[in-house]
Image (spheres, helix red, strand yellow):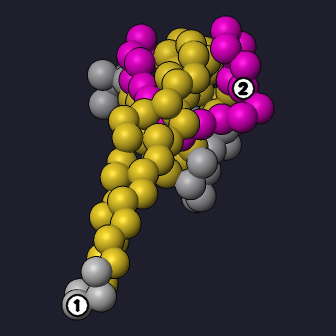
């Protein structure tokens, strides 16, 4: 099984080719565009693992942006006891749906 652990927006994500993932909103990525992620922490292919120091050099993950959307509403309730103060706030986080096309293994990862 081929997979990679990549760094997207400060979060680590385990990705496999041919799968869909939801990540934090990428404002620079328009729908139906191709992205290349080069911050690969670990790469596993055919039972062989390559650990980056800090990144795996020469390798990248090719992904396609499908669409942007708002996630589920998160509600935050605030109150102060004995003061009759109650407040409910909420927000919907913007998210991006991507499809992982392929994992490209660099030539210098053969060690």
Badge 2 vs badge 1, beta-carbon distance below 8 Å: no
Q: Residue furthest bottom?
A: 82
Secondary structure type for disc 1: loop
Q: Residue furthest front?
A: 84
- The spot of residue 15 in percent (x, y) is 41, 30
Image disc number at residue 15 = none
Q: Quadrant of residue 77?
A: bottom left
Q: Is residue 48 above or below residue 90?
A: above
Kindly identify the residue that appears in the image at 30 percent across and 30 percent down.
47
Kindly identify the residue that appears in the image at 59 percent across and 37 percent down.
25
Kindly identify the residue that appears in the image at 49 percent across and 42 percent down.
93
Q: Which quadrant holds the N terminus?
A: top left
- Which residue is more in the foreground, 52 or 91? 91
Instruction: Tell me the magenta residue range.
Output: 16-35
- The spot of residue 41 in percent (x, y) is 51, 48
Number of marks in the image? 2
- Which residue is more in the foreground, 22 or 45? 22
| Magenta stretch holds residue 26 | yes
Kindly identify the residue that appears in the image at 57 percent across and 16 percent down.
67
Q: What residue sits right under mark 2 in the picture?
A: 29
For the stretch drawn in magenta, what is the main secondary structure?
loop
Q: Quadrant of residue 110?
A: top right
Q: CA distance from mark 2 to mark 1?
A: 48 Å
Q: What residue sits right under mark 1 in the picture?
A: 82
Q: Is residue 21 above or below residue 86?
A: above
- The spot of residue 111 in percent (x, y) is 53, 41
| Magenta stretch holds residue 53 | no
């Amino acid at each position: 099984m081929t997979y990679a652990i990549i760094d997207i927006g400060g979060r680590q994500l385990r990705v496999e080719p041919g799968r869909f993932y939801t990540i934090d909103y990428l404002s620079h990525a328009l729908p139906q565009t191709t992205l290349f992620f080069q911050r690969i922490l670990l790469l596993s292919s055919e039972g062989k693992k390559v650990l980056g120091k800090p990144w795996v050099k020469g390798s990248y993950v090719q992904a396609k942006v499908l669409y942007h959307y708002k996630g589920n509403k998160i509600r935050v309730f605030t109150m102060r006891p004995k003061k009759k103060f109650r407040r409910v706030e909420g927000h919907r986080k913007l998210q991006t749906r991507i499809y992982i096309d392929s994992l490209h293994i660099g030539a210098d990862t053969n060690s």
